[in-house]
């Protein structure tokens, strides 16, 4: 199954970043503020940043006169939370990974979303994860099974179980490291490969997961460390089968690389928009968020990068060919599994640590054997 045609490849951006340098977007300068004011937003950079600027920030500036100031640099959640606690948040509207969001909630670091400034009906269209009182899904991506078409020829994987089937699909494998916790999707992948039904995935059975990984371990060439690496391993011949983000597979296919992937068993991940507590430009942040969630800008975003829009109404104006490339299109999401971030961030039974912290500890013990 082809995941991409002529699409823009978006690098999956790490969500934990410390924004230290402020640079203005949309032609504004950080030393200038229009009469309508400004709003400070993290700049994820790369193709994701370009897509956001094209679909959201530039049109918002034009429509409202409000300057969108983009803060660039490395983002660290702990530092951001410290700034909020000190009453001096570095920015106004932030993009937070689903597995990190609970830390901001626990730290009482988020303003309520002002749905009164949203257009009627927009909130109801946020799917497949609903908009919450303090956060709104930003976009959706998927971790998918991918493979080298040079190595496998006409063979096609149809599941994570096939990923484990080295007899039928011979060759080395590569997965994201479990030290990333939920971000790796490796725990879910190993469970699904072992036959766990998607509806029974949580709570994750660690014993079953690591027994599953034990079976695959002799065929693992390495654990990839960047979003680009699984594609590099596939095209370089070091690996035959890999877990990879859908955008990476899409971009490789666009360039004619001998790789392919399947949506079957895709692990759906997402980030969230939220307004920081005490944000200097909170009102403008609420206006920008409301603008971004409208179906028009959402469709523009999905046309600029192979990430799914958060507003399902955007699919009404996307072409069938474009929708087929996106993780949450009706056909693609039918066989997907949405990560349960509430479970990942919850306290593990009999422990004072989160399920994610326990999973990472188990991973470190397993990988060091």
Image (cartoon, grey):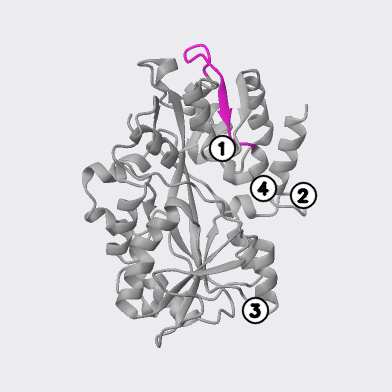
Q: Earlier in the sequence, mark 4 or mark 2?
A: 2
Give the CA separation, mark 1 to mark 3: 38 Å
Query: Are the residues tagged 4 and 3 within 8 Å (C-beta)?
Result: no
Q: Nearer the viewer, mark 3 or mark 2?
A: 3
Give the CA separation, mark 1 to mark 2: 22 Å
Q: Which residue is mark 2?
A: 350
Q: Nearer the viewer, mark 4 or mark 3?
A: 3
Q: Which residue is mark 4?
A: 356
Give the CA separation, mark 3 to mark 2: 36 Å
Which structural element holds mark 4?
helix
Q: Earlier in the sequence, mark 1 or mark 3?
A: 3
Where on the picture, by quarter, is residue 58?
A: bottom left
Q: Which residue is mark 1?
A: 188
Residue 250's place in the image compared with 16, above or below, is above
Q: Earlier in the sequence, mark 4 or mark 3?
A: 3
Looking at the image, the residue that sits furthest to the bottom is 35
Residue 330's place in the image compared with 212, above or below, is below
Image quadrant occupied by the C terminus: top right
**Which stretch appears magenta?**
165-177
Tell me what residue is drawn at x 39 percent, y 31 percent: 262
Which structural element holds mark 2?
loop
Tell me what residue is drawn at x 39 percent, y 44 percent: 9
Q: Position of residue 252 (x, y in %)?
A: 40, 34
Q: Earlier in the sequence, mark 1 or mark 2?
A: 1
Q: Which residue is mark 3?
A: 88
């Amino acid at each position: 199954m082809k995941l991409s045609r002529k699409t823009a490849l978006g690098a999956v951006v790490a969500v934990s970043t410390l924004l230290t340098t402020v640079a203005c977007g949309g032609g504004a300068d950080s030393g200038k503020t229009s009469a309508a004011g400004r709003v400070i937003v993290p700049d994820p950079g790369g193709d994701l940043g370009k897509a956001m600027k094209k679909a959201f920030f530039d049109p918002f500036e034009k429509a409202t006169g409000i300057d969108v100031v983009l803060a660039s640099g490395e983002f660290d959640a702990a530092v951001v939370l410290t700034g909020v606690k000190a009453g001096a948040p570095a920015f106004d509207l932030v993009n937070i990974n689903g597995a990190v969001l609970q830390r901001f909630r626990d730290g009482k670091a988020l303003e309520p979303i002002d749905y009164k400034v949203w257009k009627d009906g927009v909130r109801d269209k946020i799917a497949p994860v609903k908009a919450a009182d303090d956060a709104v899904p930003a976009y959706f991506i998927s971790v998918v099974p991918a493979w080298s078409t040079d190595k496998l020829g006409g063979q096609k994987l149809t599941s994570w179980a096939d990923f484990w089937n080295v007899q039928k699909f011979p060759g080395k494998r590569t997965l994201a490291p479990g030290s990333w916790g939920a971000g790796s999707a490796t725990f879910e992948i190993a469970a699904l490969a072992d036959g766990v039904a998607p509806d029974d995935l949580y709570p994750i059975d660690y014993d079953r997961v690591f027994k599953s990984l034990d079976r695959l371990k002799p065929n693992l060439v390495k654990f990839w460390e960047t979003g680009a690496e699984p594609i590099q391993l596939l095209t370089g011949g070091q690996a035959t089968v890999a877990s990879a983000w859908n955008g990476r597979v899409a971009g490789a296919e666009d360039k004619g690389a001998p790789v392919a992937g399947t949506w079957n068993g895709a692990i759906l991940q997402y980030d969230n928009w939220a307004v920081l507590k005490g944000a200097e430009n909170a009102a403008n942040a609420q206006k920008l968020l409301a603008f971004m969630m409208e179906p028009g800008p959402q469709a523009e975003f999905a046309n600029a990068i192979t990430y799914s829009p958060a507003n399902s109404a955007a699919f009404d104006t996307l072409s069938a060919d474009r929708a087929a490339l996106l993780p949450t299109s009706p056909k693609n999401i039918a066989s997907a599994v949405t990560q349960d971030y509430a479970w990942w961030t919850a306290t593990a039974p009999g422990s004072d640590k989160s399920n994610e912290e326990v999973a990472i500890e188990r991973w470190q013990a397993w990988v060091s054997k």
